[in-house]
Amino acid sequence: MQRLQRLQKKTDKLIVGLISGTSLDGVDAAVVRIRHQGLQTKIELIYFKTCPYPDELKEKLLDVSTPGRGCIDEICVLNAVLGEIFAASVQEVLREASLDAAQVDLVGSHGQTVHHMPSPRHDYSYETRSTLQLGEPAIIAKRTGIITVADFRQADMAVGGEGAPLVPYFDYLLFQSPEINRILLNLGGIANLTALPRNSSIDQVQAFDTGPANMVIDEMMQRLFNKSFDENGQIANSGQISKALLEKALEHEFFTIKPPKSTGREEFGTDFCTKFMEEAQKLNLDPKDIVATAAELTAESVWASYERFVAADRPPHELVVSGGGARNSFIMDSLSRKFEDVTVRTVDEFGIASEAKEAVCFAVLANETVSGNSNNVPKATGASEATIMGKICL
């Protein structure tokens, strides 16, 4: 406890941020120097690495993440296994960065989401919202010897929020501008959008998930080309968009739900992809056209969400894109055409690698937790109040 108390007083910390997203590719690990807290936060990305999951583990995670699949003993074991993998990822990224664990103040870990049920349910006389992230933080703390903050979503859900999106607080601290309106768009497995009016307070921040980003594209690539993703959008760029398939996919009810809202593999995973593929087969589409349409689904659902929920209030000057989708030229070109009067940039121009942003985010969220600062955005998640998110493992 004395160590934690000393940590709270430090204004300059070295923190490792960890996340494995809905793409289930592996652990993203970022070593970040963070100075100060709150709106005074300054960051420097020291080193970033993705530590891939073994293929058989990725397949098992995909299986247990599918509704109706997975059993409790498998999930119990995976929680411990992922705790070991996340801890090993910390050790690996520190070794490659020529740092020792004794130099690191904190680990912030999102974990691996296997199920997310943000809508309220009534069970056993209680109204509940629930979510499950694996990667036991106590194991991370004990293996690395570093205080670990994890399981961020639960506190927001306990006060009526959806537990997502979590990135908007980070976006507000690092990207809010006194002069221009910005939209931050992260394209991981799922796409999430944060609208930051110039000179805004946190109560003016609007953020929500817009739908799939790479999730559907990746599954189409796996099914049709036996590849895990479409590198630089090469396959999509060689195909043609099917208007009929796109319109059918956009009929999904999630796209018209008003924010706050969040989504994941429960909505756009295997079942959605199977229906997408079946519709494509009815239309006798070429595999390249199927991938092109999946990529356009990402861009079009972002644009439609912006027009439906954001445009009237705060037209942006800049759209800043991050995540693996920022490397997909098909998606980026489509976004540039749709946001024709907006400067489209990647977060790399701000000193953060596109793939590293979410890992950096959890380093910042952990810093806010130990500093005693609320780190959710109630308007984005629907929570009844601002709250401190994250469980601390000594």
Image (cartoon, rainbow, N blue to C red):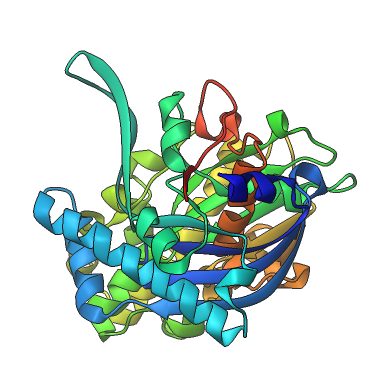
Image point (30%, 54%), residue name = 265
Of residues 305 and 168, which is closer to you in this image? Answer: 168
Say whether residue 68 is left or right of residue 167.
left
State whether residue 1 is above or below residue 75: above
Image point (34%, 39%), residue name = 253
- Residue 152: image x %, image y %? 47, 44
Of residues 37 and 126, which is closer to you in this image? Answer: 37
- Residue 216: image x %, image y %? 34, 64
Say whether residue 237 is left or right of residue 175.
left
Of residues 134 and 304, which is closer to you in this image? Answer: 134
Q: Quadrant of residue 372?
A: top right
- Residue 249: image x %, image y %? 33, 53
Say whether residue 273 is left or right of residue 333.
left
Is residue 228 visible in the rendered image? The answer is yes
Q: Quadrant of residue 222?
A: bottom left
Image point (13%, 58%), residue name = 74
Say whether residue 247 is left or right of residue 308.
left
State whether residue 238 is above or below residue 182: below
- Residue 144: image x %, image y %? 46, 68
| Image quadrant in which the N terminus is located | top right
Judged from this view, the residue extending furthest toward the top is 125
Image point (77%, 51%), residue name = 41
Of residues 171 and 180, which is closer to you in this image? Answer: 171
Is residue 241 visible in the rendered image? The answer is no
